[in-house]
Amino acid sequence: MPNDLSKPLGLKAIKKGQLTRLPLGLIGATILAATVLGAAAWIATVRDPLGGEPVAYVRIDRTKTGLNPKDVAFADPKKSTEPQPMPAPAKPGDEEHANDPSKPAATADDPAPLKQRPPAVEIVEGQPLSSTPISKITERGRYGLIPKIAADGSRPVDLYARPAPALPAASARVVIIVGGLGLSQTTTQEAIRLLPPAVTLAFAPYGSSLDRWMQRARQEGHELLLQLPMEPFDYPDTDPGPHTLLTTLTPEQNGDRLQWLMARFTNYVGVVNYTGAKFTSASDKLEPVLHDIGQRGVMFLDDGSSSRSMAESAARTVHTPFARADLTIDTNANEAAINARLTQLENLARSKGLAIGIASALPLTVRRISDWAKSLDARGVTVIPLTAAIRDGQM
């Protein structure tokens, strides 16, 4: 017989034939917990719990078109009909510039049209002149944009001209040309700022930012000239610069150099020699150059520095608009000498009706011309643009 020593501790003895009670609740809870823990571990270690199950993806249309308005960008269907300006010509002597006209342009065969502005019809103080090339008087040459005569006969010397005031025929008039601009930023800026709009500005072909300075000068109302380097008698000891026109070159070679020079910037009414005593004395070399200049509808100004110049007779032969300076204002660059030359120019205008003076853009010269011009009207003398003298038939 079983006794207390043979019974499990804390349990009653199971009699023969008596059923044992099992803790079913505890067993069920244990099984459920094990199942949940196993499922959680499986989901945590398997990226796609439904791997192997068939899956279908369905696009949900959020609008009638199936697109969210936030996902759509709208473009303006209107196309501009305004012509776009052509690329600006490259800066001289700077082959690193991306717009160097000596390099073939992608649009050379089909250049973009130039924005055309009509010439000014009346003079208004401070009124800007056209500062972008006018399409009908511009074409693309070998090295960039160059002037031309339009099909209707319009010329750059006319369309880029500054309108002149109406004056009595007997009025004393002076033309002032200030050259050497574009080489120094400070000097160029001061000349444009201080000089009256009627003063004509001449730019060297070797400066940087010539297009920017051209636009500034035109917006201030100035007519522009391009300075052409020509061979002096002591060349090459005195070397005007690259692409100088030389008596040792053929007309074709000088013509090619002329195209390079004329492509430096746009919107000028003419060209003026820079040095060139030897070249302007050689009619056989000078005439083809002046012919090309006249055929492009621009004028030639002789700076008057050489008594041996044949420019006037050559210009008449090839029918190129021409003018010649009467004196150089700052041959001696001191204040007293400049003042004396300005007085001489003023007296010459009174005696002849018209006088042309040319000067360099020295700071002293620019200041003296600026001060002198302020009281000129009160003395009965008017500063007019260079082209006004040609239109008036006085040259």
Image (tube, rainbow, N blue to C red):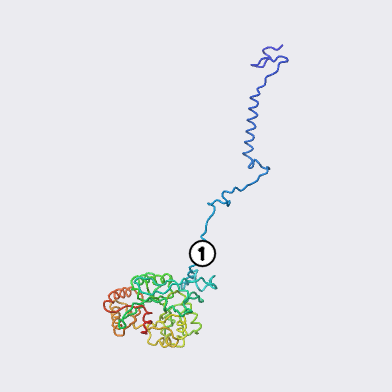
Q: Please tell me whether residue 292 is drawn above or below residue 367 in the rendered image.
A: below
Quarter of the image that includes the N terminus: top right
Quarter of the image that includes the C terminus: bottom left
Residue 330 percent location from the top left of the image: 33, 79
Residue situated furthest front in the rendering: 64
| Amino acid carrying mark 1 in the image | Lys
Circle 1 SS class? loop
Residue at figure coordinates x 41%, y 78% from the top left: 158
**Is residue 28 rendered to the left or right of residue 301?**
right
Quarter of the image where one finds residue 336: bottom left
Residue 394 percent location from the top left of the image: 36, 84
Residue situated furthest left in the rendering: 379
Residue position marked by numbered label 1 in the rendering: 79
Residue situated furthest right in the rendering: 17
Q: Residues within 10 Å of mark 1 (few under 14, many from 20)?
A: few
Residue 364 percent location from the top left of the image: 32, 74
**Is residue 380 rendered to the left or right of residue 129?**
left
- The answer, for residue 304, to whether it is visible in the render is no
In depth, the one of 349 and 243 nearer the eye is: 349
